[in-house]
Amino acid sequence: MTSIVVRTLSERVFEIVREQIVIGRLATDTPIRQDALAAQLGVSKIPLREALARLEQEGLLVSHANRGYFVQPMSAEQVDEIYALRLTIEPAAAAHAALVADGAARAQTAEAFERLDSAAGSNLAEVAVRNRDFHTALVRPGGRLLTTQLVERLSILAERYVVAHLQPAGRESRAHLEHRGLLDAWMARDAVTLEALLLQHIAGTLDDLKQQFAAGTERKVRIAEFSSPSLADNRHQVR
């Protein structure tokens, strides 16, 4: 029974800290103070350490000997690599999935879009998660396990960049229209149109992010408007 409780705490701590990283509240140049963070969350160090280790596996944290955990810096090089891989894998995989998806898979993909649509205008960390779920849902019905895992992994790595990309005015509305177009083509089993639209969608996001990095605005997140409460405010949620 105790192990189940610890895993539940670890999962919740993971979610809270992960959100703080994605929205940019935890700085990349400051070590994560485990004592202070555990106290803020109202948990022991055991679930916190489990959560931090998992975040390192996801590529959001990096550990340095005798220095502890740091948030992995965002970089133009990383965003270029992530999105180049997505361009190589995702459009063709989604086109294949659209052709073979059964009724249940089609319903699940439509539901993933609705959840993304419902999250619009709320916490951008939530939007990023729903964006990942939607893009994965476009691919999963293809039945190619490794491909699906790669797409999901790349989408996880892209979440901080998704948040940064959605900051400028009008980006969320544009993303909604593009996602609606993707869903319509996917549901119509129009593989050719879907592949072309997904290529444009991913490439357009990459181009925007490159411009943001060049201008030095990739991490100017509107925290006051979009972030969740502070870690201390989440204390009651992890107990």
Image: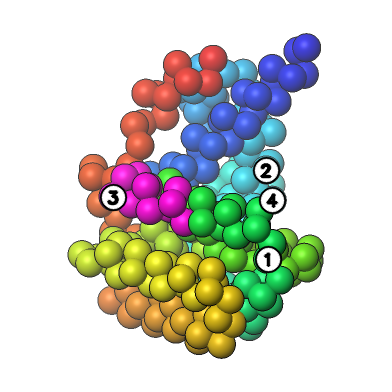
- Mark 1 residue crowding within 10 angstroms, few (<14) / some (14–19) / many (20+): many
Q: Which residue is mark 3?
A: 121
Viewer-nearest of labels 1 and 3?
A: 1
Secondary structure type for disc 3: loop
- Mark 2 residue crowding within 10 angstroms, few (<14) / some (14–19) / many (20+): some
Q: Is residue 69 above or below residue 170?
A: above
Viewer-nearest of labels 4 and 1?
A: 1
Q: How many marks?
A: 4
Magenta stretch bounds: 113-124
**Residue 57: mark in rendering:** 4
Q: Residue 152, position in %: x, y? A: 64, 60
Q: Which residue is mark 1?
A: 101
Q: Contact (CB < 8 A) between labels 2 and 1?
A: no
Residue 94 vs residue 143: left or right? left
Q: Which residue: 69% across, 51% down?
A: 57
Q: Is residue 119 magenta?
A: yes
Q: Which residue is mark 2?
A: 54
Q: Measure the C-alpha gap from mark 2 to mark 1.
A: 32 Å
Q: If you read the primary sequence from the N terminus, does the residue marked by circle 2 or circle 1 appear first?
A: 2
Q: Amino acid at mark 4?
A: Gln
Quadrant where the N terminus lies?
Answer: top right
Q: Contact (CB < 8 A) between labels 4 and 3?
A: no
Q: Measure the C-alpha gap from mark 2 to mark 4.
A: 5 Å
Viewer-nearest of labels 3 and 2?
A: 3
Q: Residue 119, position in %: x, y? A: 37, 47
Q: Amino acid at mark 1?
A: Ala
Viewer-nearest of labels 4 and 3?
A: 3
Q: If you read the primary sequence from the N terminus, does the residue marked by circle 4 or circle 1 appear first?
A: 4
Q: Measure the C-alpha gap from mark 3 to mark 2.
A: 28 Å
Residue 23 in sight from this viewpoint: no
